[in-house]
Image (spheres, rainbow, N blue to C red):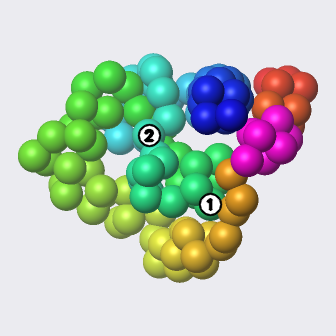
Amino acid sequence: MAKAIKYYRNKADKLFQQWFIARHPKCEMCGAPAVCGHHYITKSACSATRYYEPNMVAVCNGCHLGFHSNRSSVFNGKVVTKRGKAWWNDLMVERRMIIKTNIGHYKSIIEKYGQETT
């Protein structure tokens, strides 16, 4: 069962990343072409924000490394400053949601992001 959940979670993650980058092709930090969506609240910290678009930051490779380096507080601060208090408050509300992460949940994410077009 654990292997099946991991399979569907990985597939959902990939489709969500593709969907996100298609809608946000430029790095939010520097304007270069974005290569991935960085989770502001990490995936491991919160299931409720894993597939929540406002939790994502479109980033290039260099800026993504910045988020995962000793400069992460600078990058995180820039996102908060740019997006504002309303964004932060919304993210904190979403973070408190309870999500049951089972195969059905991941299949619904796959269906949602696998069928949408850019």
Q: Secondary structure at mark 1?
A: loop
In the picture provided, is 30 more to the left or to the right than 26?
Answer: left
Residue 115 vs 100, above or below: the answer is: above
Locate residue 83, reporting x and y percent: 47, 63
Name which residue lies at 47% across and 77% down. Answer: 85
Residue 14 vs 40, above or below: the answer is: above
Q: Nearer the viewer, mark 1 or mark 2?
A: 1
Mark closer to the chain start, 1 or 2: 2
In the picture provided, is 19 more to the left or to the right than 30?
Answer: right
Q: Amino acid at mark 2?
A: His
Q: Main secondary structure of the magenta part?
A: helix
- Residue 87 among magenta residues: no
Please identify the residue farthest to the left as the structure is shown.
70
Locate residue 93, reporting x and y percent: 60, 78
- Local packing at callout 2 (Cα closer than 10 Å; few below 14, some 14-19, many 20+) is some
Q: Quadrant of residue 6?
A: top right
Magenta span covers which residues? 102-108
Number of disc labels: 2
Locate residue 8, reporting x and y percent: 70, 29
The answer to whether residue 20 is visible is no
Name which residue lies at 26% across and 26% down. Answer: 62
Q: Which mark is residue 25?
A: none
Question: Quick one: 56 or 99, which is closer to the camera?
Answer: 99
Name which residue lies at 44% across and 40% down. Answer: 38
Q: Secondary structure at mark 2?
A: strand
Q: Which mark is residue 38?
A: 2
Q: Quadrant of the C terminus?
A: top right
Locate residue 25, reporting x and y percent: 56, 26
Q: Quadrant of the N terminus?
A: top right
Residue behind mark 1: 48
